[in-house]
Image (cartoon, helix red, strand yellow):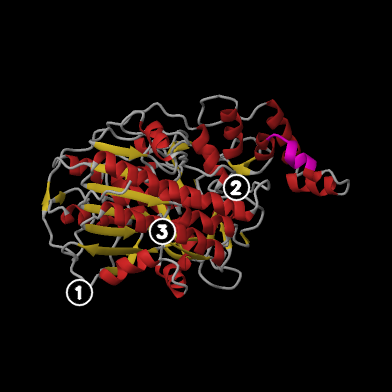
Amino acid sequence: MSSKNSMDVLLIGVDAACPSVLDMLFETESVPNIRGLIDDGVVSQLQSQIPPWTPSAWPSIYTGVNPGKHGAFGFVQFDGYDWEVVSAEHVRERSLWSLLAEHGLTSVVVNVPVTYPSDDIDGAIVPGFIGPEDPDCSPPGLLEDIRDAIGEYRVYPEYARGDTDYSDDEKMDEYCRLAKFRGQAFRYLSDEFDPDFGFVQFQKTDTVFHEFDGQTEKVRRIYEETDDQIGKILDHCDPTYVFLVSDHGIGPYDGHEFRVNEHLKERGYLESTFEGKGMPSWNPIRSQLRQGETTRTWDPGVISQMAALPAKVGISPSDVVSKLERFGLADVVRRHAPASMVRTSTEQVDFPSSTAYMRARTELGVRINLESREPEGIVPQEEYEAVRQELIELLQRVRTPDGDPVFQAVRPREEFFHGPYAEDAVDIVTIPNEFNQFLSANLAGERFGPPTEPWNHKLDGVIVAAGGDIDTTARLENPHIFDVAPTVMAAFGLPISDRMDGTVLPLIEDTGRKSYPSYRSSARSDRDVSDVEERLSDLGYFE
């Protein structure tokens, strides 16, 4: 693979990249290719959306619209009190590559999150995060071609998070292999398809913070490999325009963990149960999927229901464990007890009986159990606004044990989401104070505790633009991830979609707007979600 194919526009995604991380890497000259793009172009903070999480933010980047228009709000998509893992089937707005195809332009898309099942396009798509390990690609059979050409290719590491059979060095070796796979596959496909537009994403630059708590040497190592692959892609594809973007930033959480549902329970808005299956209930469904079942939810079996009986009379799982520890048996039980038993014997939200609740921590908000909307809604439609205002005022008053506000903002969802799918969002958006307080949906007996994850997402990511007619003197004022897709369209000299929420950044001449045909799925929908769901659990996205 030595030829250059003169790609028109290259979009590079580096998950969780942000100025503070890059500044640390610049000190040791660890990312010369990224630094070279900055020196030759323009760099700025890039504001993420609410919520600033991978499976919602990347669709916003590649569609240019807010989640209320494209429909993907988080790691799981809710249907009443049930849920399923989010996929490209939930993204119901035109993607960049789909819009470019309207103008006869071809694309190669590699490892971009939430692109499974893949569209049928003139070009190639290799799905990334939240797709299965061996995803169907576009065109069919593409994954086999890639493996024939470059050897091994995987979406996920060979090990599960927390696997003690691998040393930290071996895990980092695997991180670097995955980054190398992205670069090799992208360069191979750029030769095979000679695309006008290329989009490649690197994910482990985010995961390293979650798995290794931001350890400097580990961060530096995965970024060095990522930067090396970026340099090889730049040299091989010789793009006219280059945009490097992230979906959010990352940093330490020095505050507290605030358990929203525990607070709502104490104030009488939430009921709990020891009989429910909980939501999302990850480990039980993983067990079913490993046994070959295709269900995407779960129901507690007889053993799990029996395990819940002691909890009903005040004997908690922690009580049982403390007694077992006296006899040295606690670890044995943890290893061999069914996950569904542990889950079912834990206090959970009784969704149908509650007035309001946090469904999942990554939604950053509270959902009201509204009549005629939820399956067993109990809040009358005419009382919705009054209940919502009560909850907003309740949450605005919450202070940490140190006396600081937990929330930077508590607002109605309309301030963040608009479009045909806004009703699927939370009713009240809760933004942690400076993203320094960790929110949890768990019922854990106390409202506050130490953050479950000491490193997590921040709002400010990064954008770098270089090449072509980029105005290197341009002043960027609060660029947003919604602006990425419009700016890429403008780099091709094409009008952007009139449905986009973003605008063309002043790096390049504005090309105006036009109406494009509305979204219509061309994806193949034979989904195998077992591996996807297991990987999400391994990565710690389910509580």
Mark closer to the chain start, 3 or 1: 3
User: At 35% from the left edge and 35% from the top edge, which residue is drawn?
Assistant: 89
How far apart marks 3 and 1 lie (CA) works out to 28 Å
**SS for callout 1:** loop
Classify residue 210 as left or right of residue 461.
right
**SS for callout 3:** helix
Mark closer to the chain start, 2 or 3: 2
Mark closer to the chain start, 1 or 2: 2
- List the residue tagged with mark 2: 161
User: Is the residue under label 2 in contact with that under label 1 (CB below 8 Å)?
Assistant: no
Q: Position of residue 143 (x, y in %)?
A: 39, 34
Instruction: Provide the residue span drawn in magenta.
Output: 332-338
Classify residue 162 as left or right of residue 39.
right
User: At 75% from the left edge and 48% from the top edge, which residue is drawn?
Assistant: 318
Say which of 413 and 184 sits in front.
184
Q: Residues within 10 Å of mark 3 (few under 14, many from 20)?
A: many
- List the residue tagged with mark 3: 228
Say which of 238 and 102 sits in front.
238
Quadrant of res 29: bottom left
Q: How many marks are shown on the rendered structure?
A: 3
Residue 444 lies within the magenta run: no
- List the residue tagged with mark 1: 473
Classify residue 507 as left or right of residue 150.
left
